[in-house]
Amino acid sequence: MIDIIIDNIMTWGIPVGIIFIGILAGWLFKRFIHQRLKKMTEKTEWRGDDVIFDAIESHIVLWFFLAAMNIASSSLSLSEDYSSYLSKIILGVLILSVTLAVSRMGVGLLNFWAEKQGTDLPSTTIFVNLARIIIIAIGVLVILQTLGISITPLLTALGVGGLAVSLALKDTLSDFFAGLHILLSQKLKPGDFVEMDSGHMGYVQNITWRHTTLMERTNNIVTIPNAKISAAIMKNYDKGDPSFSVRIALGVSYDSDLDRVVKVTEEVAEGVIKDVDGAKKNEPAIVRCFEFADSSVNLKVYFRGLKYGDHHPIIDTFIRRIHKRYKQEGINIPFPIRTLIHKNERS
């Protein structure tokens, strides 16, 4: 009886001990060595090493466990077939784990590259998913080949089936490639405020494999197929220099001293630029007289806003202040006057 117990301990105790030691070693490596290396990389200027260490962090203990399993399996008295199956399973899990780590690493490096280039390409769903699908698909094919499953028939079937799928999903693929074209051409990107020829206006929220979503200023979400976005005539308010001109028209009576009117208006406009956050501080307002109207001499005041949407507080603040200041200065803003002559004809 004691001999049987000792044999069982020798048979299973050593492999279990090896696995336990492997898990403990992985935890210690992650807790101390990996964390110290990670803190060292945070001090470097290149952010790519941070992405790499973050990607492998969650897989360290699993890799040590798989290594311990491989060592422990050699101490078990397994048949050649079972030993081969176990080795293939361990290798398959390892490849899958490495694939997931590489997938996360690739997406992170793409985001880092995009930020460095000043673009937002990988931050959209379509690029993130595309990168992950490609990396994971390669990993799955490697796993199948490792397990002894021939991938040649699978690739052939995918090639033939891909043609049939492409014909059945013509509109979907059109939207997919239109989305890639939009992102690669930088026609628009998340965060831009755009106005389409259909009349839709809003901030680009995301560009997925099928649709582009816009959020209107009223917080309504508009979903537009990528193919229509790609073919649309569009005004992008944030492309290049996002600042834009804010024009405000007003009129004064004909007996006003126009030089004085312009001077007072410029003083008010200068105060608006100084106090309103949405106004461009290094761009002074321009005041121009442009029209002899029916009952007034009309002027236009031009401001520069930082981006679309900032014109509302600029216009509101200027109208309130100019109305008050004109009253103080005795400058008359006339009502529209129209003279009608009614002529009666007697028969």
Image (spheres, helix red, strand yellow):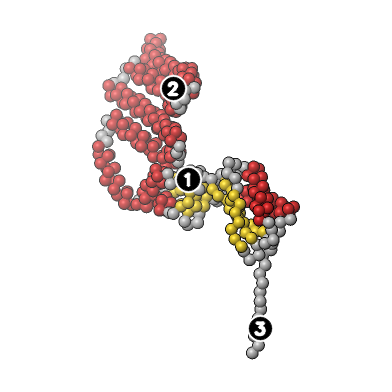
Q: Amino acid at mark 2?
A: Val
Place of residue 282 in the rendered image (x, y in percent of width and height, measured from the top left): 58, 41
N-terminal of the two: label 1 or label 2? 2
Place of residue 172 in the rendered image (x, y in percent of width and height, measured from the top left): 38, 50
Q: CA distance from mark 1 to mark 2?
A: 47 Å
Q: Amino acid at mark 3?
A: Asn
Residue under pointer 1: 239
Left/right placement of residue 198 relative to residue 89 reads right
Mark 2 surroundings: few (<14), some (14-19) or many (≥20) residues within 10 A: many
Residue drawn 44% across the image and 54% down it: 233
Circle 3 — which element?
A: loop
Residue drawn 45% across the image and 46% down it: 188
Please state which of the two labelled residues, at mark 1 or mark 2, is closer to the viewer: 1
Circle 1 — which element?
A: loop
N-terminal of the two: label 1 or label 3? 1
Residue under pointer 3: 344
**345 or 65: nearer the viewer:** 345
CB of mark 2 within 8 Å of CB of mark 3?
no
Q: Amino acid at mark 1?
A: Lys
Residue under pointer 2: 61
Left/right placement of residue 113 relative to residue 302 reads left
* Location of residue 7 with respect to 259 vertically, above or below: above
Give the tally of numbered discs.
3
Mark 3 surroundings: few (<14), some (14-19) or many (≥20) residues within 10 A: few
Can you tell which quarter of the image residue 97 is in?
top left
Left/right placement of residue 338 relative to residue 200 reads right
The quadrant of the rendering that contains the C terminus is bottom right
